């Protein structure tokens, strides 16, 4: 233990966000440039809008609730009824919502908080997160390979649920020898049995808790 380099030292401290622009350290209420999503994963479709909308049912806008792929933004897309003939809802399906002609439906997009998600959307979000990780595993392996200290007493790895000092050191020692090449590699070389589930749980915490000050993956 005495030969180990201090993982909290200033020379070691580097913002993980510089390596992975899809996540980083931050605080709720981040005041920098707005983050726009190009792709999102469908959570729930509300053809008659929100039930608490006081307008008559036939005047309510159809709503699609989605999870942004890059910044994990929770968004509602207000659909034009004229576009519904070309729209097919598929839970946890990936759609393009960025600029360009490829975007067929996301013309009016609004950021929402977790508590505004429908029950179906809340039930679907874990599956969507798992799909995002499967779609781009290198992005999340990058976290295990390059995560850094936050303060003199806390490492980014310790923000993952169930990761204490012992497991943190096991990860750091293993990646010094060789960077992790897959989630299976992490399982074989550390005591972590399901690294993907730790990522999912951490993102869920950042989405649910508006007071969470350390944001590893969610961006505002």
Image (cartoon, rainbow, N blue to C red):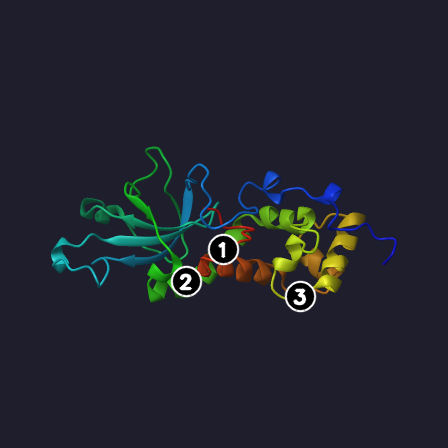
- Pointer 2 residue: 124
Circle nearer the N terminus (2, 1): 2
- Pointer 1 residue: 131
Relative to 97, residue 7 above or below = below
Determine the CA span between mark 3 and mark 1: 19 Å
Circle nearer the N terminus (2, 3): 2
Determine the CA span between mark 2 and mark 1: 11 Å
Dot 2, how many residues are within 10 Å of its Cα: few (below 14), some (14-19), or many (20+)?
some
The spot of residue 26 in percent (x, y) is: 53, 47
Residue sitting at 33 percent across and 39 percent down?
103
- Pointer 3 residue: 193
Q: How many marks?
A: 3
**Residue 115 or 186: which is nearer the viewer?**
115
Q: Nearer the viewer, mark 2 or mark 1?
A: 2
Q: Quadrant of the N terminus?
A: bottom right
Q: Left or right: 171 with respect to 4?
A: left
Residue sitting at 35 percent across and 65 percent down?
120
Query: Residue 52, which numbered label?
Result: none
Dot 3, how many residues are within 10 Å of its Cα: few (below 14), some (14-19), or many (20+)?
few
**Residue 200 or 132: which is nearer the viewer?**
200
Proximity of marks 3 and 1: CB atoms separated by less than 8 Å: no
Under tag 2, what secondary structure? helix
Residue sitting at 33 percent across and 63 percent down?
118
The spot of residue 84 in percent (x, y) is: 23, 49
Q: Left or right: 191 with respect to 109?
A: right
The spot of residue 218 in percent (x, y) is: 49, 50
């Amino acid at each position: 233990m005495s030969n180990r380099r201090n993982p909290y030292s200033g020379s070691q401290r580097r913002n993980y966000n510089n390596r992975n622009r899809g996540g980083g350290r931050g605080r709720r209420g981040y005041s920098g440039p707005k983050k726009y999503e190009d792709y999102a994963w469908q959570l729930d479709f509300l053809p008659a809008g929100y039930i608490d909308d006081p307008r008559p049912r036939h005047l309510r806008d159809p709503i699609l609730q989605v999870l942004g792929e890059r910044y994990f933004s929770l968004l509602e897309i207000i659909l034009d009824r004229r576009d519904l003939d070309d729209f097919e809802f598929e839970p946890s399906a990936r759609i393009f919502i960025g600029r360009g002609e490829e975007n067929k439906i996301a013309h009016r997009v609004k950021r929402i908080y977790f508590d505004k998600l429908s029950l179906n959307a809340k039930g679907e979000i874990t599956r969507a997160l798992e799909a995002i990780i499967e779609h781009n595993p290198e992005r999340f392996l990058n976290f295990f390979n390059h995560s850094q200290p936050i303060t003199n007493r806390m490492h980014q790895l310790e923000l993952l649920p169930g990761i204490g000092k012992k497991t943190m050191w096991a990860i750091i020692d293993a990646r010094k020898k060789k960077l992790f090449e897959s989630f299976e590699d992490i399982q074989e070389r550390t005591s972590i049995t399901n690294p993907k589930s730790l990522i999912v749980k951490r993102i869920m915490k950042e989405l649910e808790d508006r007071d969470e000050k350390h944001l590893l993956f969610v961006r505002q």
